[in-house]
């Protein structure tokens, strides 16, 4: 088996309240589609370990990590921002989400597998260096990138972010970092209302207007992302894989299809095969229409695992 599926039951216990769109059922939706599609049996399943403070502190100030540990409730719910809350299971879920990122990087760097998908929550790409935000507590993809650089000695890591929201946390962490190239598309103007004004040179940000769909997305990937990636020659490619730009997702107003998620993964896989020994690690971010999320994630995973041929 060449592709790992990393998850943990703690990620199902993080619950921000009834009617919160970032809900435990999101992971069930992906699992259901893995079974329905027959893809699940071709993946090597792993349980995500807990991230350590040392791993988190490569991205977040240690005082921030300690503050999150401190504020985590024993009972009830604590709000970190208007959209982001912790219940008694959230701390472990957040540590598993970041721990999955580290674990998956270790697997691909040790050549035990070629690629991995981490079905974890809370998501991470809005978490800034010292601020939780937009359903995110620790920046999982950033923890993965720093682990690859610091522990495995990589010089160039690319982060691909196709979530409908701009990964402002990831940009906050890696803006002007020569070891990281971030390529993203996002609806603009839209939450979190940034990413377009004077981005750092290592940020390939492509804003898309409300209503944009496959054509505009694929044009951005072909004309902006791929040339920048070819020049950068990443040794590892990470995904912030959010599926909320899907036409069926009410969170925003882009119009991507299931097939777009397979297609973009093929384009990036071709880059990974040329420059990165095929190494790809994908972290779940958004995606709130449960059916579209499950189908789109499976399109993405199918290509990661080379099961699309
Ligand atoms: Zn999103």
Image: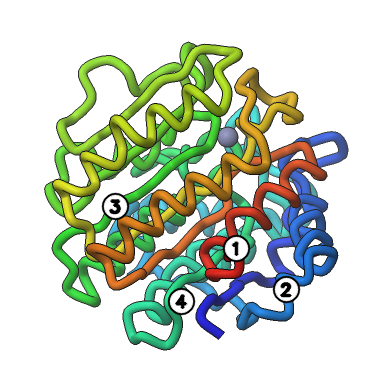
Q: Residues within 10 Å of mark 2 (few under 14, many from 20)?
A: some
Distance of label 4 from label 3 (alpha carbons): 18 Å
Q: Quarter-wise, where is residue 257 in the image? A: top right
Q: Position of residue 24 (x, y in %)?
A: 78, 53
Label pair 4/3, CB-CB below 8 angstroms: no
Q: Residues within 10 Å of mark 4 (few under 14, many from 20)?
A: many
User: Which residue in the structure is indicated by mark 4?
Assistant: 103
Observer-side mark, 1 or 3, equals 1
Q: Secondary structure at mark 1?
A: loop
Q: Position of residue 101 (x, y in %)?
A: 46, 66
Distance of label 2 from label 3 (alpha carbons): 27 Å
Distance of label 2 from label 4 (alpha carbons): 19 Å
Q: Position of residue 92 (x, y in %)?
A: 62, 66
Which quadrant of the rendered structure holds the N terminus? bottom right
User: Which residue in the structure is indicated by mark 1?
Assistant: 308
Label pair 2/4, CB-CB below 8 angstroms: no
The first of marks 1 and 3 along the sequence is 3
User: Which residue in the structure is indicated by mark 2?
Assistant: 40
Q: Residues within 10 Å of mark 3 (few under 14, many from 20)?
A: many
Left or right, 177 with reference to 50: left
Quarter of the displayed picture in which ligand 1 can be seen: top right
Which quadrant of the rendered structure holds the C terminus? bottom right
Q: Secondary structure at mark 2?
A: helix
């Amino acid at each position: 088996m060449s592709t790992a599926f990393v998850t943990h039951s703690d990620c199902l216990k993080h619950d921000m309240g009834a009617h919160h769109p970032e809900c435990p059922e999101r992971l069930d939706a992906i699992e259901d589609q893995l079974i329905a599609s027959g893809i699940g049996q071709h993946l090597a399943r792993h349980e995500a370990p807990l991230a350590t403070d040392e791993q988190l502190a490569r991205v977040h100030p240690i005082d921030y990590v300690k503050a999150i540990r401190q504020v985590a409730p024993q009972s009830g719910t604590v709000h970190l921002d208007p959209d982001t809350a912790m219940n008694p299971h959230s701390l472990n879920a957040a540590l598993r989400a970041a721990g999955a990122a580290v674990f998956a990087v270790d697997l691909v760097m040790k050549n035990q597998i070629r690629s991995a998908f981490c079905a974890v929550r809370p998501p991470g790409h809005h978490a800034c260096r010292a601020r939780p935000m937009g359903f995110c507590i620790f920046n999982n993809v950033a923890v993965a990138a720093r682990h690859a650089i610091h522990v495995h000695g990589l010089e160039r890591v690319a982060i691909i972010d196709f979530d409908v929201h701009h990964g402002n946390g990831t940009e906050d962490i890696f803006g002007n970092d020569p070891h990281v190239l971030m390529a993203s598309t996002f609806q603009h103007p839209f939450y979190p209302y940034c990413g377009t004004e004077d981005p750092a040179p290592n940020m390939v940000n492509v804003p898309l207007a409300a209503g944009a769909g496959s054509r505009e997305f694929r044009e951005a990937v072909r004309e902006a992302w791929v040339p920048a990636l070819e020049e950068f020659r990443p040794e590892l490619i990470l995904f912030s894989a959010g599926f909320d730009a899907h036409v069926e997702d009410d969170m925003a107003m882009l119009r991507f299809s299931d097939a777009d998620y397979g297609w973009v993964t093929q384009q990036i896989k071709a880059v990974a095969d040329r420059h990165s020994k095929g190494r790809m690690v994908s972290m779940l971010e958004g995606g709130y229409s449960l059916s579209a999320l499950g189908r789109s994630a499976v399109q993405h995973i199918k290509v990661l695992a080379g099961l699309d041929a």
